[in-house]
Image (tube, rainbow, N blue to C red):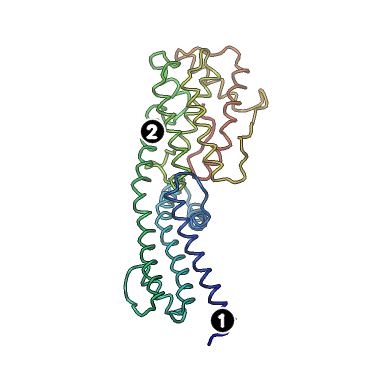
Amino acid sequence: MPSPLFFALRVIVGLSGMVLVITTLSAAIRSFVLPRNEVVRLNVWVFMGIRVFFDLAAKLSNSYERRDKIMAHYAPVALVALPIFWEALVSLGYTGMYWAVGEGNLLHCYQLSGSSLLTLGTIDDFSFIGGVLTYSEAALGLLLLTLLLSYLPTIYQSFSRREATVALLELRAGTPPTAACLLMWLNHDGSVQNDDQQWAEWERWFVEIEESHTSLPILSFFRSPQPGRSWVTSGGLILDTAALLFAAVDGPQPRQAQITFKAGCLALNRVYRFFDTKAGAEPTSLLPDEEADPGRVDFDQTCQELAAHGLKICEDRADAWRRYCELRSRYTMALGFLARLTMAPGVKSST
């Protein structure tokens, strides 16, 4: 007859295994079923562990193109590793439960757990309670794989919609893309203040970014097919264009452009706060030191270029520069953080 201490050990191991299985199942449900953004610690450990190896490989590369090629594999590898990690934890949890109900030594319990989880059926010597655990483990193993496979189309549909806008933006913003070039394209018929349709499309894009990149955060790390493109850079370019329009162009500010700018600031800052727990509730304002900021020269040159293409520019350039910097301060912290996080092409003021 087992001693009370040994019985207590079996109970503790069995309960620990049950908690591990429930925690893993909860992580899977919160990752792919719960329709809101929530940080899942188990997933974070997987992604961060894999990211260490990719960061190391990227640091050893001597060109951005090579680093981009390496990092392009990070998100797919992490996504495939996720269910493997889940199933490993489930197998470990059920091993503890099998041992707790007396199905044999730990090696036999591990083999029974693996056989049940992968539905191999190589071991059929178990008690009634062991049989219940076996069938529940087999169902849970299939459920975890099904969750990932069923959400792969959703992930790639969101990716395709995001990248379509990124590619279209590159066609309109020149090479290299700049806010000035994009603003001049919007003014191709002299109606820069009335092109609501284009701004509305960008507003919907920002809203999708906020929803998809916080509920399915791995999407943030799926890189664009072309090395020079990035959803982070594109988001910054749209916001820089809006800031330049509001600050430098003399005339009424389009309402749709204002809504798009607000949607973009909210999207970038909410994705930023999702990944960075130290981020504040509101973006920090970073105002320039009047005339001393080196970006002022670029801003003045941009204003001259816009004026040469028929846009009416505000006469008070110093005031326009202050307004431009104030508008950019609403999203530059988030933009810089996301650029570093996703290893995007260099993000700076795109005037």
- Give the quarter of the image for residue 129: bottom left
Q: Which residue is mark 2?
A: 165
Residue 86 image position (x, y, % from top left): 44, 61
In this view, the residue in front, 142 or 133, is 133
Residue at 50%, 23% (x, y): give it. Answer: 258
Q: Which residue is mark 1?
A: 6
Secondary structure beneath dot 2 equals: helix
Q: Amino acid at mark 2?
A: Thr
Q: Amino acid at mark 1?
A: Phe
Residue 3 image position (x, y, % from top left): 57, 85
Q: Is residue 45 above or below residue 223?
A: below
Q: CA distance from mark 2 to mark 1?
A: 62 Å
Q: Which mark is residue 234?
A: none
Q: Residues within 10 Å of mark 2 (few under 14, many from 20)?
A: some
In this view, the residue in front, 132 or 187, is 132
Residue 48 image position (x, y, % from top left): 52, 55
Residue at 54%, 30% (x, y): give it. Answer: 349
Secondary structure beneath dot 1 equals: helix
